[in-house]
């Protein structure tokens, strides 16, 4: 499995990768279930559909920061489900957040109705180092 290009000191990326592999083996959760989301969001890490493709700033050469993701689908389950959209019949104390389910009454209202390729996404990046704040995007499907 490929993990984000974190720009970490040598050996640390491999160590984190191994920890994610251990987490998957011990608990059944993988990196994408605990560290990313496959939905539209601001900030954080993109939930790449394809292998990560971080852009570098064409002005200063540094890796650009993730600004915004717009994805084709919104999840009806999982830890990224807003509290207000969770099924009120589920006992919040008994159901872990990553297993939460959406309220069936609001499930049909999720998403924006756009098809982006083969259910991929648009990822927007910005360089906050450069004074004129250059930006770019990536698309995957």
Image (spheres, rainbow, N blue to C red):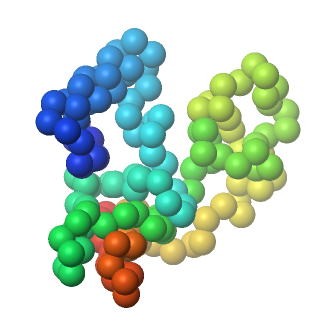
Q: How many marks?
A: 0
Q: Could you tell me residue 93's position as x and y percent?
A: 79, 22
Q: Could you tell me residue 57's position as x and y percent?
A: 24, 74
Q: Is residue 10 left or right of residue 95?
A: left
Residue 46 appears in the picture as rendered:
yes
- Along the viewing direction, whichever of 96 and 136 lies nearer the viewer: 136
Q: Is residue 120 left or right of residue 51?
A: right
Residue 121 appears in the picture as rendered:
no
The residue lying furthest to the top in this view is: 26
> Image quarter for residue 137?
bottom left
> Image quarter for residue 8?
top left
Quadrant housing the C terminus: bottom left
Q: Is residue 3 above or below residue 12?
A: below
| Residue at x 23% of width, y 66% of height | 62
| Residue at x 24% of width, y 25% of height | 15
Q: Is residue 24 above or below residue 12?
A: above
Q: Is residue 20 left or right of residue 89?
A: left
- Along the viewing direction, whichever of 120 and 24 lies nearer the viewer: 24
- Along the viewing direction, whichever of 107 and 126 lies nearer the viewer: 126
Q: Is residue 118 left or right of residue 70?
A: left
């Amino acid at each position: 499995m490929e993990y984000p290009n974190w720009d970490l000191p040598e050996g640390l990326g491999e160590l984190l990768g191994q920890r994610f592999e251990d987490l998957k083996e011990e608990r059944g959760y993988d990196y994408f279930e605990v560290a990313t989301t496959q939905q539209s969001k601001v900030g954080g890490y993109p939930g790449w559909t394809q292998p990560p493709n971080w852009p570098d700033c064409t002005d200063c050469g540094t890796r650009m920061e993730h600004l915004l993701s717009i994805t084709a689908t919104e999840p009806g389950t999982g830890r990224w489900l807003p509290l207000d959209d969770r099924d009120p019949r589920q006992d919040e104390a008994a159901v872990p957040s990553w297993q939460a389910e959406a309220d069936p009454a609001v499930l049909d209202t999720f998403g924006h109705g756009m098809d982006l390729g083969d259910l991929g996404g648009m990822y927007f990046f910005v360089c906050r180092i450069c004074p004129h704040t250059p930006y770019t995007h990536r698309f995957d499907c």
